[in-house]
Image (cartoon, rainbow, N blue to C red):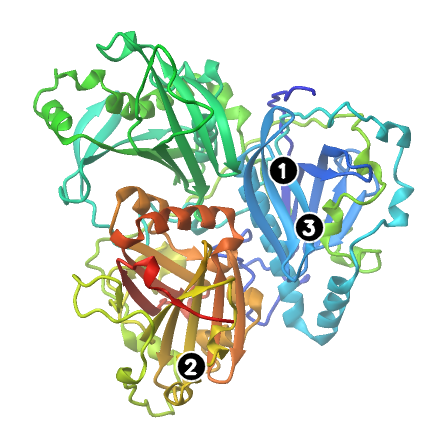
Amino acid sequence: MEKFIDSTTTTEVTVRKTPEGEGSEKDGSDSSGSGGSVLEDKEKGSSEYFGWVYHLGTNSIGHEYCHLRFLFIRGKYVEMYNRDPHENPDIPIRRGVVGPTFIVEDLGRREVNNGDLYVLKFYNRLDETKKGEIACASAGEARKWMEAFDHAKQCAEDELLRGGSTRNKLNMETEINLEGHRPRMRRYAHELKKLIKIGQGPEMLLRQSSDLQAAMRSDRYFEGEIGDAVEAHEWKCVRTINGVRFFEDVSDFKNGKGVLVKAVGVIDTTADTVFEVILSVDRHQRYEWDTLTGDLELVDSYSGHYDVVYGTHDPQYLTRWQSKRDFLFSRQWFRGQDGTYTILQFPAIHKQRPPRSGYRRTKINPSTWEIRNLNTPMGSNTMKCIVTQTLEINQAGWFRWKTNHCSKFEKTIPYALLSQVAGLKEYIGANPAVKSIFATTVVHSKACDDSIRISEYEDAEINDEFYDAISADSLSSEESDDEDEPTNEDKKVKLKNVAWAITSLALKRTSVMDANKELDPSEAAIDIDLSQFQGSLPEGKDEKDSNCWTSPGGMGFMIRGKNYLKDNSKVMGGEPLLKLLAVDWFKVDSAMDKVALHPKCLVQTEAGKKIPFILVINLQIPAKPNYSMVLYYAADRPVNESSLLGKFIDGTDMFRDSRFKLIPSIIEGYWMVKRAVGTKACLLGKAVTCKYHRQDNFLEIDVDIGSSAVARSVIGLVLGYVTSLVVDLAILIEAKEEAELPEYILGTVRLNRVRVETAEHLEA
């Protein structure tokens, strides 16, 4: 097995745009994707994305391979090459299209050839046997490729919106059987004798970076410095040490047994780089910045987003105890849709690492890392990120240190943890090579050449979706070793700065009158009698009640204001447009779709059939058994068909996926769960699989939380503390055009300390 070789060689990745009028839309359809665009709003032409990735798979004789390949995305069309076609013109070894049912899932980190890669899985939502995998050298690259594929999927959706002939053509492409060999590709294979290398393992990996980044709008990745829900924490700076600020949460001393403190520092590099350094267990690297957990080894990895590590510590550097220390903790990480990384660290127990003779087992304080890119001045080549480490510590020791700076707090584990931020800052500042190892993004944006046209693909043999371009069943050159490794020069890019203009919470809230245009003004509103609707989860009378729901207003949520496209300003939400009728808490044998059609559902009652429109949100929670939290929101008038809500109700699934947004906020509960859930808005259709069922007077959205490994991990943590949590949720449709602003909240719900065992069993 050959070792993983680091290389700082990067490859230029270009994004080209066709001029407006050349394949651009005039019908007002949105092409910006989820929460932002890989293109500027005024340029709705086709884009090109290309760079290096690793193609993972198994060949026809069952041998796993990992090949370095050049991936090219143009519109909805995808090609894969052995070499960079710009330097070595060649025929692509794979071709395909990204269809409307194409799904990309982030599988997280995976060890390949003794090195870590970040894996992306592709599959068809309607047929998961059509699948494949590619991998990237860093988490940042994986994120950018996901955005590139998301834009390709949007191009497919735009074609569907343009007319019936295109719709029929896309349907033909998606119906092609992607299994089996494709003889036309075999002629491109060379030196097939190299395929039979049983026992030698996959080919050598290079630390080759794709450096993919498009001309992204800043509201996608650098949208703001706060969440979309009003937080209850009040942080006070109590110390500044080595350029890092130490804060204490002074809002509520009753929340938890200890005191919440955090260290905050600004580091001159990208969030991607800091994330990679923190997760690395390389001893030589950690010795340069980490005074506590420098000696780490990986014990177990449960998924691409969760592992357990073991470490030892020499007592002479920290404590008065003479015995050596060891510790065991788990790490759980994920990346938000705004590009923020979150790492959760918990003390752990593992059978492979029982208490060790001669060592004293120490519990590491529960802590979190949050790493977020900062806006940089216009024209600046320097990227900055803000790094926050939060932990819970014993009150007595913390208060003694605050009042007496010379106390022994500097010799404690909590202080060593808080000092890691300062260590990272100095280490990365003193080692520019670290930035280049995890360098991301070399981007140029320019118009497509006249010789490059999407029409070039129209007559090609590409009536397959792109899953086949990454499948492992073709006897092509995919199963051969690379002969020449591609190289290219490092480049730099100037990222556009967009100011974040969130003012104080005293901003005027959005008026419910602004949202009423979504309902038909010519129809008289009906009187909805809530007493006629009873769900299995009771409605609470006050905030002290448990295992119940209430309906809060929208004041606790920040949404896009009227001038959002100009200054990114957000305002406090107003009253919800739709009224919350009831909440059902079901236990089901397996995930159940189309709950609204069940005879026991309130939508099927006589009172429910009289409601002009009902929005049903079915949150499918993976567990043993499975659960469904079903929310019912009602409109007292018919929906205006020309409004944003009307377009959402009767639109395509891709349009719905790109607009259906949820804002979470944990009002009361364990602080680690709050950090895991966060307060940033999430486009659910981009994070997990959502299925839509439109019928009669309702639209049901089935949200499969179990479809994402990250979401499963987070919901597992939430269920462990659910009986002590008070959770607020806001549901809205994301506004992306000026005519759609300001945003409005569709509905809210507050779930008060829900007890799992009270769920009512619902038979299919």
Q: Which of disc 3 and disc 2 is earlier in sequence?
A: 3
Residue 281: mark in rendering: none
The answer for how far apart the CA atoms under marks 2 and 3 are is 37 Å
Relative to residue 748, is residue 151 depicted above or below? above
Mark 1, Cα crowd under 10 Å, few <14 / some 14-19 / many 20+, is: many
The answer for how far apart the CA atoms under marks 3 and 1 are is 14 Å
Name the residue type under label 2: Val
Q: Which residue is mark 3?
A: 131
Q: Which residue is mark 2?
A: 603
Q: Which of disc 1 and disc 2 is earlier in sequence?
A: 1
Circle 3 SS class: strand
Name the residue type under label 3: Lys
- Please state, as top left, top right, bottom left or bottom right, where the N terminus lies in the image: top right
Name the residue type under label 1: Ala
Between residues 415 and 536, which one lies in front from this camera angle?
536
* Image point (63%, 71%), residue name: 161
Disc 2 versus disc 3: nearer the observer: 2
* Image point (77%, 67%), residue name: 172
The answer for how far apart the CA atoms under marks 2 and 1 are is 45 Å
Residue 308, image x, y percentages:
45, 30
Q: Are dots 3 and 1 in contact, CB under 8 Å? A: no
Residue 697, image x, y percentages:
46, 84
Relative to residue 659, is residue 287 depicted above or below? above
Circle 1 SS class: strand
Relative to residue 41, is residue 298 depicted above or below? above
Q: Which residue is mark 1?
A: 135
* Image point (18%, 30%), residue name: 394
Q: Are dots 2 and 3 in contact, CB under 8 Å? A: no
